Amino acid sequence: MSRTQAIPNPVYASNATGLAWAKALVSVTKPGITRMVTITAMVGFVLGAWQNGADSLVSMLRLGAIVAVGTYFSAAGANALNQWWESSLDARMRRTRNRPIPAALVQPHTVAKLGLLLALVGTVVLFLAGPVPAIIGLACTISYVLIYTPLKTRSAWCTLVGALPGALPPLIGWTAATGGWAFSDMLAPGGQALFWLMMVWQIPHFMAIAWMYRTDYADGGMRMLPVIAPGGRSTSWVVLLTSILLIPATLAPALAMPQLIGVVYPVVALVSGVWFLWMGIRLARHRNDAMAKRVFFASIAHLPVLLLVMVCEAFVRTVLL
């Protein structure tokens, strides 16, 4: 019996009740990813507000709460719809077969309804910050669910396409902080710098994940690059090239927002960028699971450090000095 045949298909019934059922519903929203999306949106909001001069602390807190709640709900809805869409594929992969739908903890239609409700509520809440943040949030949901998700079983380009909804959240926050009504605010240097930082960072991050779970992705019918090019040469070169591009992408916010960012952030960005590039070079040389795992862990350390230092330096220069 093959690996795929050995893994059961999802049972479309709910065996969970009470607290277990509620926990399963929370789980389908992928809280960890949802939190990270919300954090990047808030980074865009805070930097946009400081860059353009916030009216008052009270108004900034009120608008910030709207951005946080709206982004969180939108991301949670998109993640729930993604798990509903991929439930039959999740049942064929070892790393995902215990997710709530294939594990028969919740019914698929319940997850679909939850996802649609959360996405709708998130969009409505973001509209309170302006139509542009709401449209960007809706674009994240649509591109993630209706373009990226089905593309995963059709083309290796899915990783690049999937980076778009992951890169847009900072622009939700940025445009909310700059009025929320002008699409031209999306093109502001600060917002664009954050967008491209997120866009480039995601490629080596998700390539490392795809490498580590390439057998699972093959079982699920996912057309990730490590699946269609199992030797790893193509994947390692993509990681290496995007690791090189990540250095100027991480330095771009300092060039785009010199009023907010001084010396500290560029030094941290350059040092951490060179370190991450070294991880990419080692993966290109060795092409094994251990190195892919190191690239993955390096990526999840790299981004939070950059965002934290960026916001802290901007806070010191804007609020304390």
Image (tube, rainbow, N blue to C red):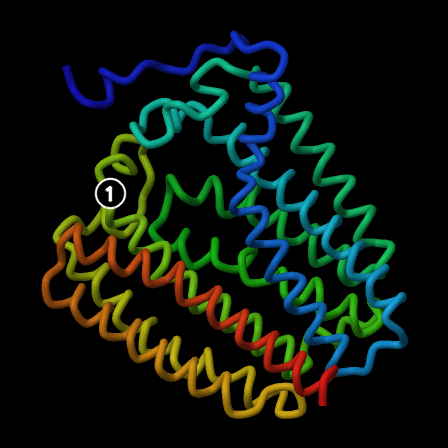
Q: Nearer the viewer, residue 313 or 192?
A: 313
Query: Which residue is at a point 56% across and 17% down the rendered structure image?
Result: 20
Q: Would you identify the image quadrant in which residue 321 lies?
A: bottom right
- Judge left or right: residue 279 versus residue 193: left
x, y percentage for residue 31?
A: 56, 40
Give the residue drawn at x 28%, y 61%: 295
The relative height of residue 61 versus residue 182 in the rendered view (above or below) is above
Name the quadrant of the N terminus.
Answer: top left
Left or right? Give the position of 9 relative to 84. left
Relative depth, front residue between 27 and 89: 27
In what element is the residue under mark 1?
Answer: helix
Residue 128 locus on image (x, y percent): 87, 55
1 over 98 or under it: above or below:
above
Q: Position of residue 129 (x, y in %)?
A: 84, 60
Q: How many marks?
A: 1
Q: Is residue 9 left or right of residue 48?
A: left
Residue indicated by mark 1: 214
Looking at the picture, how far across and down is residue 251, in whole percent?
47, 84
> In the displayed structure, would residue 23 be above or below residue 300?
above
Count residues near mark 1 (Cα–Cα under 10 Å), then give few for <14, some for 14-19, many for 20+.
Answer: many
**As drawn, is 78 to the left or to the right of 49?**
left
The residue located at (54%, 31%) in the rendering is 27
Q: Amino acid at mark 1?
A: Arg
Residue 28 quadrant: top right
Q: Please give the name of the residue rendered at 43% of the width and 87% of the height, measured from the top-left corner.
A: 267
